[in-house]
Amino acid sequence: MVRLFRRSILWLVPVIVIPLAAVLVVQYRFLRTLEQKSVSAERSWLRESVEVVADAIDNDYRAAALRALSIEKNCLCDGAVLSDWFRRTPVGGARTFFAVQFDGPHASYLYFAPNGTAKSLGSDEDQAVKLSTVAWHVAHKMKRAVAHPALTVDERDERHRIIMRPVVDASEHVIGVAGVILDERLARAAMMDVGARVLASRYKDHASYLRLRISDRVPAAVPGREPMTQPFSFVFTNWRLGIRDICATPEELAALGFKNNMMLSGGVMIVLFGAIGLAIQAASRQMKLSQMKSDFVSNVSHELRTPLASIRVFGEYMRLGRVTTEEKVREYGEYIEAESRRLTQLINNILDFSKIESAEKKYKYHETDVVALVHETVCAFAMPLRDHGYEVSFTAPAAMLPPVVLDPDAIGQVIMNLLDNAVKYSNGEKSIDVIVSDDTEHVRIAVRDHGIGIPDSEQKKIFDKFYRVGSGLVHDVKGSGLGLAIVNHVVKAHGGRVEVVSAPGQGSTFTILLPKGVAPPSVAPPASAAESNQGKDTEAA
């Protein structure tokens, strides 16, 4: 049954592992796809962000320039009014404001600093202004009507970028021009300020991680990694606004997310495999325990049939009158008594094990002569074995031992179990030694046989319930598998321990060590010897 179950477990391994491996592969592919989409999403978000900031900068320049260059026609020649107006309507990055009035073929020019004071221009700057206003001067001469004067930008000279707006009269004819000359360095700083304000207001949670950059060069294109830049559409149109995350690139962020997800998925898989392994192990253990219980029932049935058959046979001989001599009657009576004792011991083991399992086992402790107890038990055990050639020798200590607080019936049963094991595993060696001795702390009861012995790897397991050593001769011996488990429990309940010395082919020695002069755990010793002799025993679980 156990072998069949183990084979079924081996079939379960591919049934469980293959689907889980498939799930892991699918998860890996999904996470790779998610990584790629995360890169695309992050880059799209950055691209959208830079577009928003670039549009905001363009709109800010349009609004500021339109406000500053919206001059009434009657103010073109009034320097004081223009000075105050330009001072109160700043434009980011402005170097010089100017106003031009056309009078036939002639034109008069007024120049102002951003703070409103009048200024004169250098030849290059003056030439740039005149070239940029020529078209409007021509429109004036041709009396061209301009219904809705709009802003225009002249960037032919990149050193002197100019924003202009024509001034028209009541008939919508051009009579002059108002404009502003931009300084590249000042304009770059003003653009960065506007961009920072937009990031802070629109992307509050991420603004601290984003950095803007303005460049007049187009970045080199990398396949699959198009640059997150946006050109300006109003002024400085050859400049590009770029944006980046100072913590990591989109590829690095996606790779980190993939790594974290894979670690999480791997952890879940490990836990899942561990849970499945534990479940299989628990099922295997239960099946093994079930098999052990089945073997126990089979072995106990065999153990019960053997003494019962002997008792029935000898009883029938006596009932049918086939036994005529007193010697035979006594002999058959001894056989019946021995087999009854063997049957009683087996039943007691089963009942004691049941009580131990249900934590109902109780002991009656009182001061006992250990030497006398062991001697009586050995004599009772050796009687039915004498006709089979077994020799059970008993060695008492040289000096008298003090009484020990114990349960005589429980310790007697322990010794009987050890003697019974010695007989079962003797392998034809019919000599058994029982030795009582002591040391400074313990009374020692040793049961030694010269049988098949126990391997080192099995010596810690033999005290487990239902456990049977798996090697040849040991496994062939019938038994309940409870004897040594009961021995270990009883001795521990008395505060002692069991030691095993054994080797294959050299026999085994089981030694019981009982504490000397003290009561077992949680058990108070009798108040006096008189009370002990009167039968006032102390009970403990």
Image (cartoon, rainbow, N blue to C red):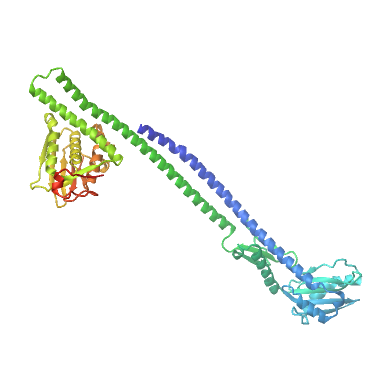
Pinpoint residue 366: horizontal percent, then vertical percent.
17, 45
Q: For the N terminus, which image quadrant?
A: top left
Count of numbered tags: 0
Pinpoint residue 484: horizontal percent, then vertical percent.
24, 39
Residue 401 position (above or below residue 219) = above
Tell me: 394 left or right of 470.
Answer: left
> Is residue 473 in sight in this rendering?
no
Q: Foreground: 174 or 281?
A: 281
Quarter of the figure with residue 87: bottom right
Q: Foreground: 78 or 411?
A: 411
Residue at the image position 56 percent from the left and 62 percent from the top:
247
Pinpoint residue 402: horizontal percent, then vertical percent.
12, 48
Residue at the image position 50 percent from the left and 49 percent from the top:
265
Q: For the C terminus, which image quadrant?
A: top left
Quarter of the figure with residue 183: bottom right
Tell me: 67 left or right of 33.
Answer: right
> Is residue 301 in sight in this rendering?
yes
Residue at the image position 86 percent from the left and 79 percent from the top:
77
Residue at the image position 64 percent from the left and 57 percent from the top:
45
Tell me: 424 left or right of 224.
Answer: left
Quarter of the figure with residue 406: top left
Q: Foreground: 499 or 416?
A: 416
Pinpoint residue 367: horizontal percent, then vertical percent.
15, 46
